[in-house]
Amino acid sequence: MLESALLQGTLELLVLKTLSVEPMHGWGVAQRIELMSSEVFQVSQGSLYPALQRMKRKGWIRSEWRKTENNRRARYYMLTPAGEAQLGVERAEFERSAEAVIRVLEWAGGFA
Amino acid sequence: LSLFSDLRERLTALLFRGREERALDEELRFHLEMEEEANIRRGMSPEVAHRQAVRTLGGVERTKEAVREAQGLDLIEDLVRDVRFAFRSFARTPGFTVTAVLVLALGIGATTSIFSAVRAVVLRPLPVAEPERLYMLWESDPEVGWETQAASPANYLDWKERVASFADVEAYGSAWQVPITGLEQPITLRALNVTGGFFSMLGVRPLLGRDFTAEETWASATWRAGPTPLLLSASTWRTVFGGDESVIGTRVTFNGGEARVVGVMPEGFAFPEEGVQLWVPFGWADEARESEWFRRARSGPSPAWPTAPAPRRPPRSSTQ
């Protein structure tokens, strides 16, 4: 899942959304996305970590090492102000596309 | 911001290569362990949980490769490799290297000096319409030993009216500092006196407003008739007068007398040098034509100059 070019942007959107709730390590991000999407999306580490790195380069997220609840060291990612703005942009863009796709799918022939 | 964070991320990744690699290792190990623990919680034996986790996660090396690619390291590494290779090649073939550097240096040098010359001669000629027809006229006095001497106003007028070889003769004075008030702040500007037909002889038209008229050489048409007309340089217009077209008609006090802006000269027009900020007609007193001072050439500042506000210096004259 999420390997195709079409869904690349969607993965970034979902990661931004997840990190907007609270700072989280990579595994936690993957878990949240799987859980919240009722396991429709399986986020592989092969696409997650490169995506996190890309988003870091774009200045949308930053990272720091923190302790987990179980006292383990993990790299946590968090949104920057630029990332928060980007979340708004990408969300609006996605909703627009999704609505458009649905309108096309629901078209029953003829023109309103 | 994004460009900056991009560069910073790439540089950190490059400079702290080992540290970044170890961090990524630790991050992926953590990921694997968390996956294993989740599997154990689902009821698998530790061994099965480990195998299952490894299988779900896929190749660790492939992930690392993809992260490195996302860090943008390939590009920089390639560049560094290319530069190293170039330097090694130079070192191997010093003769070729010296030749190449010399050819480049000469090429760049020649181009630069040719451009400088072309710029001075072709691109920035005298700011007039037909510079090749323009001559400078001087007075000389062998008895006193004066060679290129500023002409007296009377002689200038004789040349203008009686010498048929010249289509026109016009004159300008030396630049002087003039106090100007009536603007937001009092200011001193560098002004130059000219005869009324000066700019039309040069073939230069104002960018805004009007040129001086031939009559405005005389006081009867300038400071006695009303406000003295002023022509501003484009940069004075922009910096002192706000650069608005409504500047035409602006009244100021010029050296204690009433004056009015009648025009703005084109961008880049400078005469006789860059520092002149505005131009004003001489405004010679009409009845002065017969007086002694009007007929005498001067080599320096003259205390006997009349009280008219404009004429401070005897004119030099230029012609075409």
Image (cartoon, coloured by chain):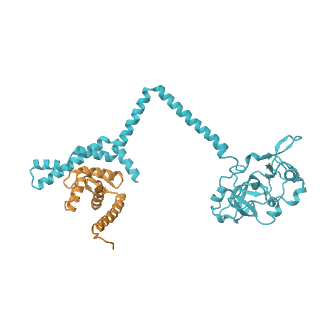
Chain colours: A orange, B cyan
Which one is in front, B187 or B125?
A: B125
Seen in the image, is B100 located left or right of residue B132?
Answer: left
Q: Is residue B48 above or below residue B222?
A: above
Left or right, residue B233 beside residue B153? left
State whether residue A67 appears in this view: no
**Rendered image quadrant of residue B198:** bottom right
Question: At 17% from the left edge and 47% from the top edge, which residue is drawn?
Answer: B54
Image location of residue A74, percent across then percent down: 24, 51
Q: Is residue B132 left or right of residue A76?
A: right
Q: Is residue B125 above or below residue B178?
A: above
The residue located at (42%, 32%) in the rendering is: B87
| Front in this rendered view, residue B119 or A31 | B119
Q: Quadrant of the N terminus of chain B?
A: bottom left
Residue B280 in picture, x, y percent from top left:
75, 58
Q: Position of residue B72 (x, y in %)?
A: 34, 45
The spot of residue B184 in percent (x, y) is: 65, 64
Residue B142 visible, this orientation: yes
Q: Residue furthest front?
A: A110
Furthest residue to the bottom? A112
A38 over B108 or under it: above or below: below
**Count of numbered badges drawn on the protein:** 0
Q: State the residue in front, A48 or A67.
A: A48
Residue B189 or residue A59, whichever sits in front:
A59
Q: At 22% across and 53% down in the image, what residue appears?
A: A27
